[in-house]
Each structure stands twice: as structure tokens, then as C-alpha cells.
Amino acid sequence: MPQTNNNTPKDVFLHLFNIFTFYLSVIAFITLWVQYVNKLFPDNLTYYFDNISNMFTWSSAVLVITVPAFIITTWLLEKDIKKVPEKKDFILRKWLLYFTLFIAGVTFVIDLITFVMYFFRGELTTRFFLKVLVVLLVAAAVFVYYLWELKRKEKIGNTLKFLSTILAVVVIGSITVGFFVVGTPKEQRNRKFDTERIQDFTNIQTHIIDYWSQKEKLPENLEQLNNDISGFTAPKDPVSGLNYEYNVKGDLTFELCANFDTTLSQDETKNIDTYYYDMTTTQNWAHEKGHVCFERTIDPELYKNSDNTMLNPKVIR
């Protein structure tokens, strides 16, 4: 039986903090690998690189902080148990271990049920299978570890060191994979700037079309789009702060140019969130790295009878 005088508020703090960092680490680890699957096997209906990038950043940050915290608190708890073996029977410790086993077991079963259900439906895609596999492996690893933790008689110091090393290697390796799958922090930052440029181009293009529909001519420069009443001001490049390059190529043709830091395919750009109504995925904004121009030609048949193109923008050639 546990002796209450062997358990202190410090023990309560360490056990709760240890299990909190563990749960957070598991959630972040699963999220990290699910985002890798999303990136490598994109779904065109739900693919948003910014979301993947943000979740990768969040998961990596959580793992960098919580995994060392989990290892340190585990070491402190084992150090106390070695000094006072009765602490191994601390009721809070037993509750947390069994509760974690319960959560891991339930997750394992639900994951298998989901897998079988989608298999019977004929909806088992590679993308879905890999996500199920990630959750399955993590839940199984957690269940085995805590089952061993409950049954072990004594933990040898080298065993804890070995498990801590394995955990650290797996986490570091998982985060490193992200630099190849999602990109380095610098690449992600550059990609966000390019996304902002595409958003700006869609914004500017919409106002150019509106300008032409009202005045039946293209603006000579982007400054002519500025409107004190509507509050619109032609956006500038987010890095240089300079105006975007705008050239009139004909009565109905114009081009917008910018220096891009990354290469984006059409699949990656078509779901970029642009701010103006239904004109979000109709244009091809795919581009290579470097100086790129997008030439657009207005079809007058689509706009000659339009009283308000801002409310119903159409595709231009």
C-alpha cells in the first residue's frame, strides 16, 4: 500500500506535467505526419498549402518544447522512485497510466473501425490509408509503452536513456523530414510572399476590369485605380514596397508582372484565397521563380452589358 507521507505536491506536479507534455507531444506528432500526407498526396478539394505550413510550424514548435520537457520530468520521476520505491504505487500515477492506456486502446479500436468502414465502402485511398496508419502506429506505441510501464518491476537507468534517445531521434527525424516536404522556414516565408502577390494580382485585375467596364478603356497606370470613395489603393509588392509592374499591351490586353521567390504549380495556386467573391480559382496563376508576367485580355462580350462587374466577375482570356 502506498504511504501518503511519501507523496508530496511536487509528485503531483511532476506527474500531471509529465502526462500533459506527453499528450501534447503525441497530438503534435500525429498532426505533423498527417500534414506530410496532405502535402505528398494532396486532395484538390481541400488542399491549402498555407494550412499545411502553419500546422507543420505549430507541430514542430510543440515537439521541440514538450518532448524535452517529457523526458526531463520522466527522469525526475524515476529518480524519485529509485530513492523511494513506494512512490511507484502513488494512486495518481496509477490513474494516469491506466487512463492513458484507455485512451490509446480506444483510439486504436476506433482507428481500425474507421479503416474497415472505408474499406467496405470502397473509399480506401492511399491518402486516407496513410493517415489511418499514422494514428494506428502511434496509438499502438503508446499502449505498449504504458503497459510495460505498469508491469515493470524496476527500470534500469540504461533503459530510460535508450528510450529517451529513440524518442529524440524519431522527433528530430520527423521535424527534419518537414524541411524536405514542406520547406525550410525561409522557403515557407517566401512562399507566403508569393501567395500575397497572387492575391494582389487578382485584386488589381478585378479593379482593372471594373475600370474598363465603366470607362471603356484600360487605365494607363495602377495609380488610376485608386479611389478615395471606395477606399481602394493599388497594393504594392510585399517585399520591395514598390508598385507592381503593369503594362498596357493593347486596347483590351494588359499584363501584370512581379518577381517571385518560389515556383508554384497551377494545382497549388488555384486554391489560394483571393478576396473577391467567386473569382478565386478561375485564373491560371502558376509561375516559375523569378520575373514573371501574366498577360490578360478582356472579352468585351462578357462585360459590355454589365453594370457592376465587381459583383459578378467573369473569366478573361
Image: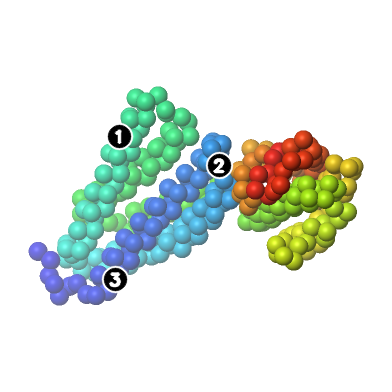
Secondary structure beneath dot 2 equals loop
The x, y position of residue 123, in whole percent, is 42, 28
Q: Quadrant where the C terminus lies?
A: top right
Q: CA distance from mark 2 to mark 3?
A: 41 Å
Tag 1 or tag 3, which sits nearer the N-term? 3
Describe the element under mark 1 as helix, strand or loop: helix
| Extreme residue toward the left, this view | 1
Badge number at residue 124:
none
Give the image's coloring scheme. Answer: rainbow
Label 2: few (<14), some or many (≥20) within 10 Å? Answer: some
Label pair 2/3, CB-CB below 8 angstroms: no
Does any portion of residue 295 appear in the rendered image?
Answer: yes
Residue at the location (44% across, 35% down)?
Answer: 128
Label 2 sits on residue: 47
Give the secondary structure at mark 3.
helix
Residue 292 visible in this rendered orientation of the protein: no
Q: Amino acid at mark 2?
A: Tyr
**111 versus 2 height, above or below:** above
Q: Which residue is mark 1?
A: 113
Is residue 210 found left or right of 47 in the rendered image?
right
State the image coordinates of residue 253 (x, y, percent, origin top left): 85, 42
At horizontal 86% and vertical 56% (from top left) the residue drawn is: 221
On screen, residue 175 above or below 71: above
Q: Give the CA separation, mark 2 to mark 1.
A: 26 Å
Q: Which residue is mark 3?
A: 13
Residue 40: image location, x then y, percent = 56, 38
Most extreme residue toward the right is 250
